Amino acid sequence: MRGIVIAALLCVALSGYGNIRLPRIISSNMVLQQRDSVKIWGWADPYEEVSVTPSWGPQTYKATGSRDARWEVKVATPAAGGPYTITIKGKNTIVLDNVMTGEVWICSGQSNMEMNAQKGLQDVKAELPSAHLHNIRFFHIPKTTAPYPQDDCDGQWAACDSITLQAFSAVAYFFGKRLSGELNVPVGLIGASWGGTAAEVWTPDSIVHNDPVLEQAAAKIIPSGMCPYQPGYAFNAMIAPVTPYAVAGAIWYQGENNTGAANTYKQLFTAMIDGWRAAWKKDFPFYFVQIAPFRYRVKNTGALLREAQLQSTAHYKTGMVVITDLVADTNDVHPANKHDVGLRLANLALADTYHRKGIPFQSPVFNSMRIRGHRATITFSHADKGLMIKGTTATEWMIAGEDQIFHPAEVAIDRHSVIVSSKMVKAPVAVRYGFRDAAMGNVFSREGLPLAPFRTDNWEVETE
């Protein structure tokens, strides 16, 4: 008992030497989500009084350090603007300056999200001389892992310029630049990506380990010397620390490293999305990129993964951009065109989240099939202005009968629908479009967005 009393007295005595501290994500140059109740938090001595005073209004927010030395306040943010200061006082004083309010997005995935000017991307290199964009701010989280969720991470907020842009995600930059320009607001981009990672690594480990199907799929991940493979390890160190930070939504570019278990990707991916939303306590929009055409070593695994991604769009407040036309070399898993990927993600967010009108943002997707005689008529969603072929003949269309043998098809566009047939198939049963790993079809909406690959059957697909 005496030892407990002495320990308690020492704790109280030592507390007089503490200073209030902030996580790295709360710093000068940050962008706070506009018109929201955002959390400002940190650490202080137990029962230490902390005050937070933003310069945009007269109100001061107060908190008291908890027994475990934590404190937090909820601060009401104004409409987009700045720069502001935020003064935080306890036993010491911290002044955050050059703070903006605007739109904040988390940008994550594997190598195609990670790639930047330092990786040789010409489209973002061309931006460097004119990249001094005060209204775009980056928070880059370096590659880190942890077996348990962390409450802080490395990184610092920085305004976009010719130096900071070089190491930041090109997709995220082009996304943010388009949003900032169209909405005329500051945009904060939190970058957390790692080439070669599977989605399990970005998913809270409890989600994987509490589901036998997902746990079995995770066990098949082949460890690499370049990246983690344990479920939750990237989430714990690179996502969990920023989940108290208010965001508008997330963009995601990943999937190539899950092609070996495409049959469980929809279940995993949608569970990951739910896990992130639960961690943020917000059902924010989640927009992602369908993986690009590429010649995978195991046949049809890329086609099946793209199918799983398309199926995932049925999940609440999600959206997908198709990029089958943005590939110059199907032997390169890293397509060089990141400008148009970011632009399509931004257009999706502008139309779906910010309700801007007149922006083409959805690729046509399969809706229904009707068979009459030897012809199959396919209809599509998001093709209100009609379809078109780029080139003289539609490619990547296949048709099969009950024998499940697919033959190249003849195609005719009937404004909103496609009529498919083949002399080799007298009684059609199934149609496929672009259902190969490296397929680059040439049917588009009249607005110029590529038709999403699809199949009408659910037959077993050869993956040898």
Image: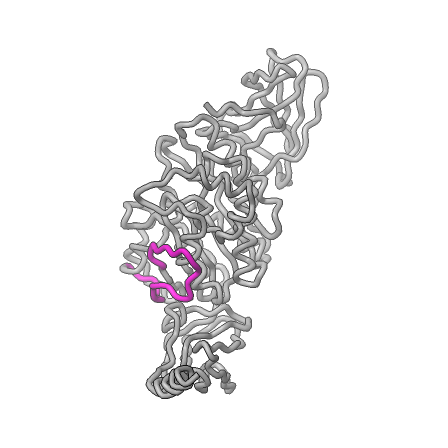
Of 447 and 279, nearer the camera is: 279
Q: Is residue 161 magenta?
A: yes
Residue 14: image location, x then y, percent: 34, 85
Side of 125 where 256 appears, left or right = right
Q: Is residue 223 magenta?
A: no
The color scheme shown is one colour
Q: Looking at the rendering, which quadrant does residue 364 occupy?
A: top right
Q: Main secondary structure of the magenta part?
A: loop
Indicate the quadrant containing the C terminus: top left, top right, bottom left or bottom right. top left
Q: Is residue 418 above or below residue 212?
A: above
Q: Which residues are magenta?
A: 141-162
Q: Is residue 273 above or below residue 422?
A: below
Q: Quick check: can you spot residue 112?
A: no
Q: Looking at the rendering, which quadrant does residue 429 occupy?
A: top right
Of 435 and 100, nearer the camera is: 435
Name the residue at 68% across, 15% down: 427
Of 171 and 214, nearer the camera is: 214
Q: Quick check: can you spot residue 311?
A: yes
